[in-house]
Image: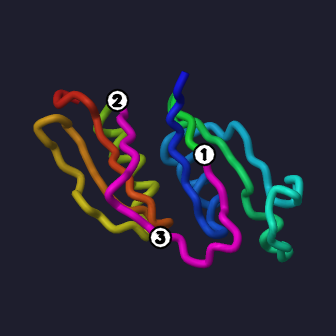
Amino acid sequence: MVILTPTFNSNGQCEEAIKLYQKAFNAKIDFLLRYSDADPRDFDDSLTEEQKNYVYHAEIYIGEQRVMFSDIIGLDHLIKSTSLFLTVTLDSAEEVKKAYEVMKDGSTTIYPLQSTTYSSCFVSFVDKFGFRWGIMTEQTER
């Protein structure tokens, strides 16, 4: 069996991002492990008090899809890319608008809320953490 799991890496903002996605998509936190609770042999760096509270590994579910998260220590600059992104398909335009409303502060819009040939409501943006999202309905009549 092959399982493809999207994984988001950040530098100290992981927990804040998880909480935002939890609110936007009614995501369920399945697992959250902090550096302070992990086996220190897993990483080479000595940690500051702040870093001990960073997320070492977390898993949430957006619908039935597992998404993993972690704060990467020792990588001062993570390279952001907007060519690969997650698309979340919701049942109605109202749900799309609600999720976008939760996530739009500090974001950069790529495609504004609009109706397309394949979706009654679609939006694409880079959130305040630097991750690109597409939120849409699947059918045009909703």
Report how far apart the C-alphas of labels 1 and 2 lie in the structure. Answer: 24 Å
Residue 89 place in picture, x, y as percent: 35, 35
Q: Which residue is mark 3?
A: 79
Amino acid type at image mark 3: Ile
Choose the circle earlier in sequence order: 1 or 2. Answer: 1
**Would residue 99 appear left or right of 114 to someone viewing this image?**
right
Q: Of the numbered discs in the image, which one, if any, rests on residue 68?
A: 1
**Residue at image location 23% in from the left, 42% down from the top:** 121
Residue 117 place in picture, x, y as percent: 11, 37
**Residue at image location 68% in from the left, 47% down from the top:** 58
Q: Quadrant of the N terminus?
A: top right
The image quarter containing residue 142 is top left
Q: Which residues are drawn in magenta? A: 69-90
Q: Which residue is mark 2?
A: 91
Tag in front: 1 or 2: 1
The crowd level at tag 1 (other Cα within 10 Å; few <14, some 14-19, many 20+) is some
Magenta span dominant secondary structure: loop
Report how far apart the C-alphas of labels 1 and 3 lie in the structure. Answer: 18 Å
**Would residue 73 appear left or right of 27 to someone viewing this image?**
right
| Residue 137 covered by magenta stretch | no
Residue 91 place in picture, x, y as percent: 34, 29
Amino acid type at image mark 1: Met
Tag in front: 1 or 3: 3
Front-most of residues 101 and 69: 69
